[in-house]
């Protein structure tokens, strides 16, 4: 059985050298989720030792659209650091990534700690504002081919995040009904509504709080949580402008340089 710290080290160098890996489960089909989350956390500790600050968390594979294209049938989570937050309105530097993809999400800014067991209601009560968001994801595995433990160890393919222009208190919205249009070079690539994420985007945050409680971890005031993609992703390439438009939360344009 491969050790969590060893997995974290291999993934960190793949990210640094922008070199794709074969999934660990090819060689180690017995890699379990517990070890994978240990490897993920070891990766976060490496980042913190290098000066990165934890600013939140991301969910992945929370919509059937995403589960279908990635061929994995369960959600997962990862952590977000300050280095991953990309400035709104500026081009995304492709040289930082291996093969980035872009997908629309909803981000929650927590005003206070959410206690477990969490529900949609308790998450909404603890949320200060929601934002349109874009996940610029970048698997460290070739062709985004992985099994659940691989992608867990790889911090849910976390790489970059963009937040939209409007912060809206959740009480002013029905998050299930927010329409979302993803365009690549003007052409509609995918559409969805908020309910694509677990029936209600806040259900993803509740799921995360409850999973974290099993590992003795919490989501604290001031943290951002990304819901997971509402639609399948599109590749980010130089010369192609991708826009993610979410009803009432605004539009995020992503272009690469
Ligand atoms: C895994 C990460 C999934 C999402 O929103 O579903 C994710 C991947 O697709 O590489 O970020
Ligand atoms: Mg995502």
Image (cartoon, helix red, strand yellow):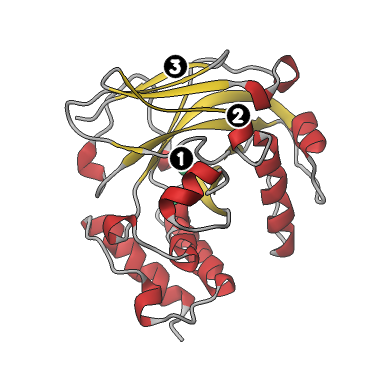
Residue beneath disc 1: 82
Q: Are marks 3 and 2 in contact (CB under 8 Å)?
A: no
**Dot 2 crowding, Cα within 10 Å, few <14, some 14–19, many 20+:** many
SS at circle 3: strand
Q: Nearer the observer, disc 3 or disc 2?
A: 2
> Residue at horizontal 76%, vertical 32%?
126
Looking at the image, tell me whether mark 3 or mark 2 is earlier in sequence order: 2
Residue 235 on image: x %, y %: 28, 38
Residue 193 on image: x %, y %: 57, 27
Residue beneath disc 2: 194
Residue beneath disc 3: 251
How far, Cα to Cα, is label 3 from label 2? 15 Å
How far, Cα to Cα, is label 3 from label 1? 22 Å
From the viewer's perspective, tell me whether residue 195 is left or right of residue 214. left
> Residue at horizontal 82%, vertical 51%?
117
Residue nearest the viewer, comparing 133 with 113: 133
Residue 124 on image: x %, y %: 75, 30
Residue 79 in view in this figure? yes
Residue 183 on image: x %, y %: 35, 23
Query: Is residue 202 positioned above or below 173 on the image?
Result: below
Query: Is residue 209 positioned above or below 196 on the image?
Result: below
From the viewer's perspective, tell me whether residue 253 is left or right of residue 54. left
């Amino acid at each position: 059985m491969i050790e969590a710290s060893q997995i974290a080290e291999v993934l960190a160098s793949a990210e640094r050298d922008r070199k794709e890996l074969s999934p660990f489960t090819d060689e180690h089909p017995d890699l379990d989720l517990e070890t994978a989350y240990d490897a993920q956390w070891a990766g976060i500790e490496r980042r913190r030792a290098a000066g990165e600050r934890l600013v939140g968390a991301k969910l992945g594979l929370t919509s059937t659209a995403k589960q279908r294209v990635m061929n994995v049938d369960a959600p997962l989570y990862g952590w977000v650091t300050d280095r991953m937050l990309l400035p709104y309105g500026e081009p995304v530097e492709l040289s930082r990534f291996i093969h980035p993809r872009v997908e629309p999400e909803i981000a929650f800014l927590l005003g206070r700690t959410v206690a477990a067991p969490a529900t949609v209601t308790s998450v909404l009560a603890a949320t200060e504002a929601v934002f349109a968001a874009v996940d610029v994801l970048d698997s460290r595995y070739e062709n985004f081919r992985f099994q659940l433990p691989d992608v867990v160890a790889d911090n849910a393919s976390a790489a970059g995040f963009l937040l939209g222009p409007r912060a809206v208190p959740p009480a002013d919205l029905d998050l299930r009904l927010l329409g979302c249009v993803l365009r690549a070079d003007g052409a509609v690539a995918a559409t969805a509504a908020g309910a694509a994420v677990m029936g209600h985007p806040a259900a993803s945050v509740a799921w995360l709080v409850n999973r974290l409680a099993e590992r003795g971890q919490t989501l604290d005031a001031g943290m951002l949580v990304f819901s997971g993609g509402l639609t399948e992703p599109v590749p980010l390439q130089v010369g192609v402008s991708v826009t993610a438009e979410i009803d009432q939360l605004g539009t995020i344009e992503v272009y690469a340089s």
